[in-house]
Amino acid sequence: MSTAPTTTTAGAARPAPVSKSAESALPATAKVPSRIRGERPTGRVPFGRLVHVELRKMLDTRAGRWLLIGIAVIIAVALTIMFFDNGGDHPYGLYLQATTMPMALILPVVGILAVTSEWSQRTALVTFGLEPRRPRVAWSKTVAALLIGVAAFALSLVLAGIAHQSAITFRGIPADWSVEGLVLLGAGAYVLLGMAQGLAFGMLLKNTPAAIVLFFVLPTAWSILGAMVSWLQDAAVWLDLNQTMNPLFEGSLTGEQWAHLGTSVAAWVVAPLAVGIWRLTRAEVK
């Protein structure tokens, strides 16, 4: 039985030659894929996009959402207690204190997690792969944290106003909206400095438990030692952030008190943030 010879049509594509030493029938030469059409990005990632991504990392996570829920519950409980205590007869400044304190104390943990989670979950490999300029990543985290602090302070102003107006309307108390400018400045600075300090501790340590514990323990321990140990009291006047911010809440600051405040902010916020950014730009992701 004879087999009919096969003929090839002129112009038909011939199969690629197969290597004789190959274990499978694969072509010895690979065909280069055709170029994908469309424009290629020629510039770096916009800084606004980096800030937007960092905002999502801080808020659009399970830990971030539960922290925000916890802050909302604490503020709701505090305002409810004030609404029924003494017939709700409290000035606007006290309602504002009830809304800013939980944010200033708990919200910095969001900033800590925004940095430490990159190292514990190794997402820094992706972050620095997409944006290898690490200082831009560090500054985008800083800007995002400060934006959250500004939004939180604005929300605390609104919530305090709603609570005070509700007490005026439903409890019949006299209106007292008087708040000095330095008091507002102190409340806003308390929230923003807390966010910046939490971010700084996160960058400095890159470990969630250590950063959270030291963020709460170190300033408190220093305040206690400064009040109890006599030879530390002079240094505490300059380096105790809680002590130097008290005149802001009282509505009056002298030139020397401004110097005390600036020194304590430099020691507890600026220096850790600077060293943290330096470490972030040089640390190896493991």
Image (tube, rainbow, N blue to C red):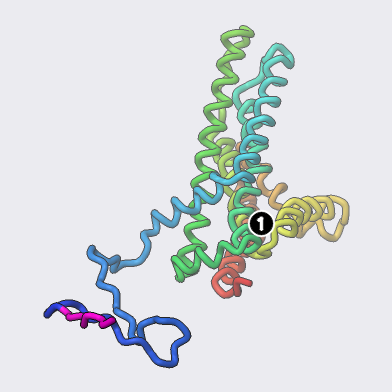
Image quadrant where residue 276 sits = bottom right
**SS at mark 1?**
helix
Q: Name the residue under label 1.
A: 264
Which residue is more in the foreground, 29 or 100? 29
Residue at horizontal 59 percent and vertical 19 percent from the top: 164
Residue 159 is at least partly visible in this image: yes
- Answer above or below: position of 179 versus 34: above
Q: Residue furthest left?
A: 10
Q: Which corner quadrant holds the C terminus?
A: bottom right
Q: Position of residue 20 (x, y in %)?
A: 40, 92
- Is 2 magenta? The answer is yes
Q: Height in image: 4 above or below 271? A: below
Residue type at the position of mark 1:
Ser
- Image quadrant holding the N terminus, namely bottom left
Whether 166 is drawn above or below 47: the answer is: above
User: Which stretch did the figure color magenta?
Assistant: 1-8
Q: Which residue is painted at 60% across and 73% down in the image?
A: 283
Question: Toward the viewer: 57 or 90?
Answer: 57
**Residue 259 appears in view:** no
At horizontal 70% and vertical 11% (from top left) the residue drawn is: 87
Report the number of numbered marks.
1
Q: In this view, does 278 lie to the left or right of 227?
A: left
Percent of width and height locating residue 279: 60, 71
Q: Residues within 10 Å of mark 1 (few under 14, many from 20)?
A: many
Q: In percent of the image, x 67 and y 17: which residue is there?
A: 83
Measured as percent of width and height from the top left, residue 121 is found at 63, 60
x, y percent for residue 153: 55, 37
SS assignment for the magenta stretch, majority: loop
Q: Is residue 248 magenta?
A: no
